[in-house]
Amino acid sequence: MAGYAPPIKRLIEELGRFPGIGEKTASRLANFILQSSEDDARRLAESILDVKRKIRLCSVCFHLTEDDPCEICRNGSREKDIVCVVEDPDSLLAVEASGSFRGTYHVLHGTLSPLDGIGPDQLKLAELARRVEQDGVREVIIATNPSMQGDATALLIMKLLKDREIRITRIAFGIPVGGDLKYADRVTLAKALEFRRGM
């Protein structure tokens, strides 16, 4: 960053704090902002502040929302007794975009990762157990990612809820629609066989 004026250096440093943004990308973004009009820069700054001021977690499912409870939890046509547990808001949006799920959600805001200091207390697990107990939930669908952390979190949820009289399911993993078996890796094929279903 040598040669940049101090305000540009500061902007590059701040942009570089975003995940996946290295120094080169941060420099390109800073230069883009610098070449934008003052109105464009103001709109960007205001939108960042707006998000920080207005967005909060839904008190029911912990999705990001401006109104509490969120739009999904307020929707009377949703099946309130079926809860899909996801890792983060992006996962919720992915399931919702499929258009095939009419239940509600529970956002954990992470997965178990002891090396990163994320244990059960950092996730919304106690809230999930309380919700299952109080809201007449009959099925919990665990939709964590097929990773070590996602699998560990899924196992913990199963242990947490095993004594309740509810159905606990896990989303299936395997070969994508339109995929070709010969290009699938061993883990994906193993998961496809493990989660096979009757015809």
Image (cartoon, rainbow, N blue to C red):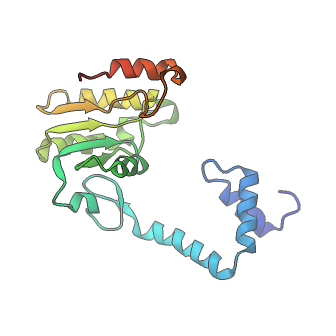
Asked if residue 48 is positioned above or below residue 151 in the image, the reply reads: below
- The answer to which quarter of the image holds residue 155 is top left
Name the residue located 36 percent from the left edge and 18 percent from the top edge.
193
- The answer to which quarter of the image holds residue 137 is top left
- The answer to which quarter of the image holds residue 128 is top left
**Residue nearer the viewer, 16 or 189:** 189
Name the residue located 69 percent from the left edge and 80 percent from the top edge.
37
Asked if residue 83 is positioned above or below residue 191 in the image, the reply reads: below
Give the side of residue 17 with respect to residue 142, left or right: right
Name the residue located 45 percent from the left edge and 26 percent from the top edge.
148
Asked if residue 192 is positioned above or below residue 118 in the image, the reply reads: above
Residue 189 percent coordinates (x, y)? 44, 20
Residue 58 percent coordinates (x, y)? 30, 58
**Residue nearer the viewer, 115 or 175:** 175
Name the residue located 43 percent from the left edge and 50 percent from the top edge.
90
Residue 66 percent coordinates (x, y)? 35, 67
Query: Image quadrant for the N terminus?
Result: bottom right
Give the side of residue 136 with respect to residue 175, left or right: left
